[in-house]
Amino acid sequence: MMNNKLFGIILFVLSIFIFSGCENASKKDQDNKSATENVISEELHQAHCDLVAKANEEMAGINTKVRTLNDKIREKGAKFTDEQNKALDDFEAKQASINKRMHQIKNVKQENWESFKTTFEKDLEEINALIDGILADFE
C-alpha cells in the first residue's frame, strides 16, 4: 500500500516536471517568434522609410518638371491639343493617386509590401514618363 502511494507521488511529481518543461519550451518558441517578428518589423520599417525617401526625391523632380512646363506654357502662350489635355488629365490622376499612397506607405503590412512597392514604383516611372512627354511637346 505504501509502495502504491509512493509510486503515485513520484508519478505526480514527474508529471508536473514534464509539463513545466513543455511550458518553458513553448515560451521559448514564442520568444523566438517575437524576436523574428521584431526583426521583420524593423526590416519592413526600413523598407517603408526607403520608399518614402525615394518617392519624395522623385516627386521633387516631378514638381520641378511641372514648374518648367508652366514656364514654357506662359512663354509660348500655347493651347493644349486634345492629346496633351488627356496626358495632363492622366498625369493629374496618377499624381493624386501617388500622393494618397505616399501617406499609406507606413501602414502597409509585410504580406502586401512587395505588391505595393512594385505598383508604387511603376506608377512613379509612369508619371515621370508622362511629364517628360508633355514637356517634349513644348520644346
Image (tube, rainbow, N blue to C red):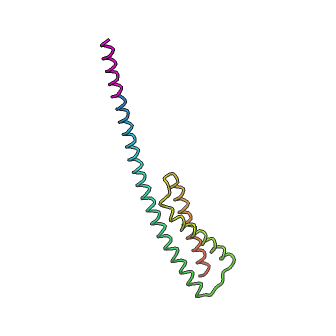
Total numbered circles: 0
- x, y percentage for residue 23? 37, 35
State which quadrant residue 85 falls in. bottom right
Residue 41 in the image: above or below residue 5 = below
Residue 75 in the image: above or below residue 124 = below
Comparing 89 with 104, the one in front is: 104
Residue 53 in the image: above or below residue 111 = below
Q: Tell me, yes or no, whether the highlighted magenta stretch contains residue 12.
A: yes
From the viewer's perspective, tell me whether residue 61 is left or right of residue 31: right
Q: Residue at position x 49%, y 67% from top? A: 55
By secondary structure, the bulk of the magenta-drawn segment is best described as helix
State which quadrant residue 86 falls in. bottom right
- x, y percentage for residue 56? 47, 69
Comparing 51 with 23, the one in front is: 23
Q: Residue at position x 52%, y 74% from top? A: 62
Q: Residue furthest top?
A: 1
- x, y percentage for residue 72? 57, 84
Q: Which region of the structure is painted magenta?
A: 1-17
Q: Residue at position x 62%, y 87% from top? A: 77
The quadrant the N terminus occupies is: top left
Comparing 11 with 112, the one in front is: 11
Q: Tell me, yes or no, whether the highlighted magenta stretch contains residue 8.
A: yes
Q: Residue at position x 49%, y 58% from top? A: 107
